[in-house]
Image (cartoon, rainbow, N blue to C red):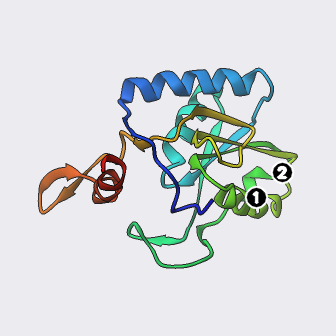
Amino acid sequence: MDSYNHYHSHVLDLSWDEFGRLCKELAQKIRSEYAPEVVVGIAKGGVIPGVVLASAFSVDFFPIKLSRRHNERIVRKEPKIFVPPTTDLKGKRVLLVDDICIQMQTLNYAKAEIQKIGPREVRCATFAVHKNSKMPEWYAICTDALILMPWDRDVLVKGMWRLNPEYEEEMQRVLC
């Protein structure tokens, strides 16, 4: 399964309330098996669920940014590190968080970078996975829907709010 070309069965327009409810459930699943000492969110999509989980666990949050994109367009085959992991992860139990997982490529790349710091342990969680995804240890929702995430559903274009063009393009394929 290609990370960027995968099947969507329908559209799920996720509300902030539903996102919050699912994050609480995810936090409970994680806490029943793991006690992270720090949460690392992969920018940009993993930062928001990462911050929510860090707050739920009352632990520090740190971002890491690696991406194949520049301004939402895919411009490189391999991810480039823009914000490396902090040395504050040394010796800690780390929860690494992203918004969605298809093939674990981004999570594995970020995990390898974090491992260079010398954490005690790194485990992974994502907000969403697809049914045929490679699975992290934890996730909030498993669906083949195109998920319109509440934090990037709408974007400003020439001073006007409109549906994110990336979603708009994919919705055309899903709804046809």
Q: Position of residue 52 (x, y in %)?
A: 53, 33
Q: Residues within 10 Å of mark 2 (few under 14, many from 20)?
A: some
Q: Position of residue 170 (x, y in %)?
A: 36, 55
Q: Residues within 10 Å of mark 1 (few under 14, many from 20)?
A: many
Label at residue 114:
1
* Element under disc 2: loop
Q: Position of residue 144 (x, y in %)?
A: 51, 41
Residue 74 drawn above or below residue 65: below
Q: Is residue 153 left or right of residue 93?
A: left
Q: Is residue 100 left or right of residue 60?
A: left
Q: Nearer the viewer, residue 139 or 59?
A: 139
Label at residue 163:
none
Amino acid type for the residue under numbered disc 2? Pro
Question: Residue drawn at (70%, 40%), measured in percent from left and top?
Answer: 38
Residue contact at pointers 1 and 2, CB within 8 angstroms = yes
Q: Quadrant of residue 82?
A: bottom right
Question: Residue drawn at (34%, 59%), measured in percent from left and top?
Answer: 166
* Element under disc 1: helix
Amino acid type for the residue under numbered disc 1? Ile
Label at residue 119:
2
